[in-house]
Image (cartoon, rainbow, N blue to C red):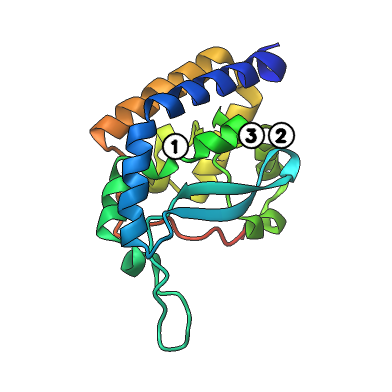
Amino acid sequence: MYKKFIKHIIDLFVSLAVLIVLMPLFLIITVFLLFANNGKPFYFQQRPGKNEKIFTLVKFKTMNDKVDENGKLLPPAKRITKVGKFIRSLSLDELPQLINVIKGDMSLVGPRPLLIEYLPLYNEFQKQRHKVKPGITGWAQVNGRNAISWEEKFKFDVYYVNNLSFLLDIMIILLTIKKVFKREDINKSNNETMEKFKGNK
């Protein structure tokens, strides 16, 4: 009942309420990023959702589009802007994903939507993460985020899929709020983004 119906209703109403309350902040960030990113405050990318259905993810754009002499994008650590780094440190870059939740592409809680290029690399165990909608936050995020390995992250994702419940969702949301305020597990390594998943060896 919760998984098939109630969770979606909660996602919709909570997302609408949060988006309305935080709209002034949303607009302020948009204006700052308009200047920081040459008129491009948002980042759009296709990601796989439930049952590997592709949707367009929206986030605040925290990196510029600078390239090297060969026209190739510079590494993320060299492209992140000062404004973007601050926004990421507070996890505010995820705020526009509330729109994805309202549209039904995502849930407030679930495995994070990863890159389409990873789809052929998953084994049968890892593919289970796509049995539910991806989330803005998830069990893997509150258990290490970028600080844990891909193997650990997938184990947390599949655990969530197999144990999805109202109480688990509430626990994840509360832990997420705690970690955002304490700024825990946010890029503990020297990299601004986690190393790409290269498949199972």
Mark 1, Cα crowd under 10 Å, few <14 / some 14-19 / many 20+, is many
Tell me if residue 48 comes above or below residue 111 in the rendering.
below
Helix, strand or loop at mark 3:
helix
Gap between marks 3 and 1 measured at Cα: 23 Å
| Real-space CA distance between mark 2 and mark 1, rounded to the nearest whole angstrom | 18 Å
* CB within 8 Å, label 2 to label 1: no
Residue under circle 1?
141
Mark 2 and mark 1 lie on one chain; the one further toward the N terminus is 2
For label 3, the residue is 103
- The residue that appears at 64% across and 13% down in the rendered structure is 6
For the point 51% across and 49% down, the residue is 150
Look at the picture and state if 6 lies above or below 23. above
Q: Residue at x 30, y 61 (%)?
A: 81
Q: Viewed as shown, does residue 123 lie left or right of 166?
A: right
Mark 3 burial class by Cα count in 10 Å: few <14, some 14-19, many 20+: few
The front one of 155 and 12 is 12
Which mark sits nearer the N-terminus, 3 or 2?
Answer: 3
What's the mark number on residue 131? 2
The amino acid type of the residue labelled 1 equals Gln
Query: Which quarter of the image is occupied by the C terminus?
Result: bottom right
Front of the two marks 3 and 2:
3
Q: Which residue occupies 33% across, 45% down?
A: 29
Q: Is residue 34 visible?
A: yes
Q: Position of residue 122 (x, y in %)?
A: 68, 52
Q: Amino acid at mark 2?
A: Lys
